[in-house]
Image (cartoon, rainbow, N blue to C red):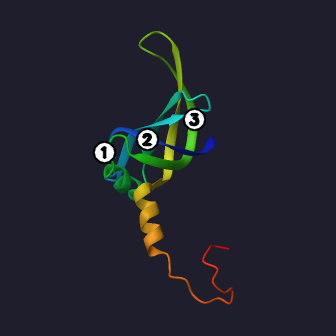
Amino acid sequence: MIDVLIQGRLRGAAAVKTTKTGNPFATFKLAASDKTGESVLCSCIAFSATVVETVQRLGDGDSIAVSGEAAISSWQGRDGSARHGLDVTVHAVLTAYHAGRKRADKPKHQDDGFGDYQGDL
């Protein structure tokens, strides 16, 4: 098992399905760039209700960051070349929509004895 935090772009729409016990889960693909700029395909699956709800609201090309457990996968491309990627079990996600909401919810500056300082400590 490899713990990962990956940022990339959603490729296609997430598919939401139901387990035999009636719980929803989502599968989706994420394209991230490696240090050479080559795209690495991450096949993701999520069982968390929060993650499922979030990814089904996103569309192709939306920016997303995921954290979870990963395993390296290999396959042969259509052109016969060896390809590699990651299979990721996603535990949490962060999108640009989350960041905007968090900023809006941040409390206003309070007098804390540091004068006019407006930044975070």
User: Gap between marks 2 and 1, in whole Å?
Assistant: 21 Å
Label drawn at residue 71: 3
Q: Residue furthest front?
A: 116
Looking at the picture, which amino acid does disc 2 mark? Arg
Residue drawn 50% across and 80% down?
107
> Is residue 55 found left or right of 67 in the rendered image?
left
Q: Residue furthest top?
A: 80
Based on the displayed image, in which of its 4 quarters is residue 43 positioned? top left
> Is residue 4 found left or right of 11 in the rendered image?
right
Graded by Cα atoms within 10 Å as few (under 14), some (14 to 19) or many (20 or more), the crowding at tag 1 reads few
x, y percentage for residue 90?
A: 49, 48
Label drawn at residue 62: none
> Is residue 25 found left or right of 89 in the rendered image?
left
Q: Cβ–Cβ below 8 Å for labels 2 and 3?
A: no
Mark closest to the chain's N terminus, 2 or 1: 2
Q: Which residue is mark 2?
A: 9
x, y percentage for residue 44?
A: 45, 40
Looking at the picture, which amino acid does disc 1 mark? Lys
